[in-house]
Image: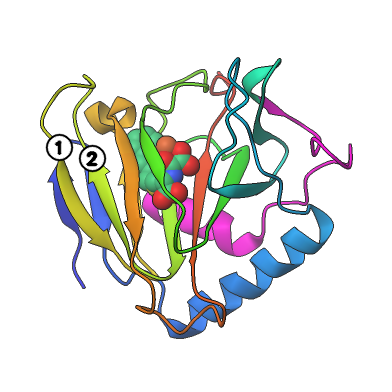
Amino acid sequence: MKPLMLQEGCIWHPGWLDGRAQQDLLEEVRAIVRAAPLFRPVMPKTGTPFSVMMTNCGPLGWVSDQVGGYRYQPVHPETGQPWPPMPQSLLQAWAALAPGAPPPEACLINFYRTDARMSLHQDRDEADFNVPVLSLSLGDSAIFRMGGVERRGKTRSVKLASGDALVFGGAARLAFHGIDRVLAGTSSLLKEGGRINLTLRRVSPAPA
Ligand code: MD3
Ligand code: FE
C-alpha cells in the first residue's frame, strides 16, 4: 500500500513488511527476548507499573524505574548484560525509511497483551529531535492515537496493523501519542495474541 501522511512529518506505510518479513522479524525478536528477557518498567516517583512489557536491542536501551526515572543505558536492568545487537533487518528498515539519518542506537521493543495500553506521552529522552523515530508493528492491530506538540490539542486515531511502519520526523517528532487499545484476534502472527511494537531511535547527538 502506498504511504500516507497522517500529519506534517508523520508518514504511515501500511503493510510495509509482507508476511514473510513479519515472520522473520518475529524470529529475530524471539531471539532478542531469549538473550534480554522482557521486563516491566515502572513510572518514575510513583512506581506504578506499565501494562506493557519491554526489552531492547542495539547499543542502548530505554528503561524506567522508580528512582532513576526514564533513561537509556547500555545494559539490561535485571541481567546487567549488554543489549543484543540490532538485527540487519532493522538497520535496513532505517536506511530505507529514514534515509540520511545517523544510525539508530536503540530499538525499544514493546509487548502488549490484549489488555495493555500506553497513555498519551511525548518521546523526549533523546538528544536530537531532528532525527526521526521509526516504528514497526507486529501481531494484533491497535488503535494508535496521535495529537500535536501540546497535550491538550486535538488528536486523531488510526488502526495500526501487523507489518505497518510509521516514521515520525519534523514536527511530528514531538507529537503526543499513545495506544488506546489492542484489538484481540485481528492477527494470527502471534499464537497467543497480543501486539509487538519496535521503535528505532537515535539517542545521542548526531556525529558531526
Ligand atoms: C511519535 N510506542 O515506545 S509506536 C513508545 O505502539 C511508543 O508501542 C507506541 O509510543 C507503541 O514510545 C507507539 C508509535 C510512536 C513511537 C515513537 C514516537 C510514535 C511516536 C516518537 C515520537 C513521536
Ligand atoms: Fe512513544
Depth check: give the residue in front, 188 or 175.
188
Find out whether residue 136 is within the magenta segment. Answer: no
Residue at mark 1 to residue at mark 2: CA–CA distance = 5 Å
Classify mark 1 as within 8 Å of ligand 1 or not, answering yes or no. Answer: no
User: At 17% from the left edge and 21% from the top edge, which residue is drawn?
Assistant: 152
Whether residue 87 sits left or right of residue 149 in the image: it is right
Residue 111: which numbered mark, if any? none
Residue for badge 1: 155
Q: Position of residue 7 (x, y in %)?
A: 14, 40
Whether residue 20 sits left or right of residue 129 in the image: it is right
SS for tag 1?
loop
In the rendered image, the quadrant that contains the C terminus is top right
Classify mark 2 as within 8 Å of ligand 1 or not, answering yes or no. Answer: yes
User: At 46% from the left edge and 20% from the top edge, which residue is drawn?
Assistant: 128
User: At 56% from the left edge and 83% from the top edge, which residue is drawn?
Assistant: 191
Q: Is residue 139 above or below residue 76?
A: below
Report whether residue 162 is seen.
Answer: yes
Q: Is residue 44 above or below residue 18?
A: above
Residue for badge 2: 146
Q: Do the residues bearing badges 1 and 2 touch, measured as CB atoms within 8 Å?
A: yes
Q: Amino acid at mark 2?
A: Met
Whether residue 24 sits left or right of residue 37 in the image: it is left
Find out whether residue 80 is within the magenta segment. Answer: yes
